[in-house]
Image (tube, helix red, strand yellow):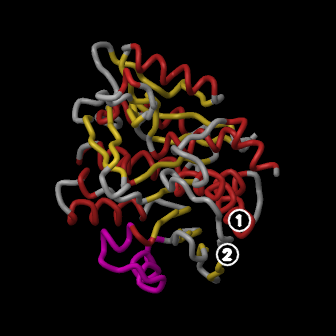
Amino acid sequence: MAHIAAIGEVMVELAPFPIDAPETKDRDLMALSFAGDTYNTSVYMSRLGLQTDYVTKLGEDSYSKKIMQRMNSEKIGTGMIECIAGRSPGLYIISNTPDGEREFSYWRKEAPARELFSTPENSEALFLKLKECDCVYLSGITLAIIGEQSRKNLLITLEKLRTAGVTIAFDSNYRPRLWRDKQEAQDAMLQIMQHTDIALLTLDDELLLWGDDTIEGTKARYKHCNLRELILKRGAEDAVIITANSQVHIPVPPVANVIDTTGAGDTFNAGYLAARLLNKSAEDAARQGIRCAGIIIRHRGAVIEKSVFDKELGA
């Protein structure tokens, strides 16, 4: 079985939970869950047949224990997770704005995941475990939450992994509020792309970060990075697969009854990477990614029930 490890942060999520009852009239009831971009991807990669491990740092509090239990229930390996006494995972709250959009408020400055790759010793210990994987997956959020020195340690680790034959997959997932400024984010993205084999980018993020969302502009930006595959996600428009010798467009079928697009890109990544690591073509991998994302956006939340996902995937 192909083996992948995802690096990142799992956070506690509180989202509105409407109940039409008199006793709740003046209260905001919230549903508790767990989420994070690379974690969401890990859940679906595991469901799609990959041996999946997650790499992060948590606390020893009750919520960290519940996160570990949730991972175990999804058959996600936790052997690369360090739990630190006296610490707790980050938290975010989703609120609904008057115009129907969703607003996110974060509390993550003290989250233990921010200490990933904080020392050469910690990085070497992770390398020794990660080198046993076929692929390592991470995102721009992973980069943003760790410090500058930690990013340097991470890049050294990624290059050692590539030398050891491990494929590196990366989704830029640019979130401006996580970075000191745009220049810091641009520098970090260009650096990690030099250590990436499969880049899974969203053109909306490219526009936010670089002021350009054209296919040609994106190709030119990363042409010296020696990427094996560059996949451009464009929402309802064709996904584009770019290699050294080809550019292929994969149509995105229309989806009826779209409810929530949260996590669509994470789920596309899971479908794509699962297919590629199970030796399917890039074109078939993109089709699977599109199909998985099409399932998620018909439901509320980034991680839907396994029974629902499996049923719709098999339909």
The answer to the question of whether label 1 and label 2 lie on touching residues, with beta carbons closer than 8 A, is yes
Q: Which residue is at a point 36% across and 14% down the rendered structure image?
A: 61
Identify the residue at image location x=68%, y=51%.
274
Q: Which residue is mark 2?
A: 250
The disc at residue 54 is: none
For the residue pair 223 and 208, the one nearer the viewer reads as: 208
Q: Looking at the image, which residue is at 54% across and 24% down?
A: 79
The boundaries of the magenta stretch are: 205-225
Q: Is residue 76 left or right of residue 202?
A: right
Residue type at numbered disc 2: Ile
Q: Is residue 165 visible?
A: no
Q: Is residue 208 magenta?
A: yes
Quadrant of the drawing holding the N terminus = top right
Give how far across and how far down residue 302 sits, in percent: 52, 45
Which label number is shown at residue 287?
1
Does label 1 or label 2 sit earlier along the sequence? Answer: 2
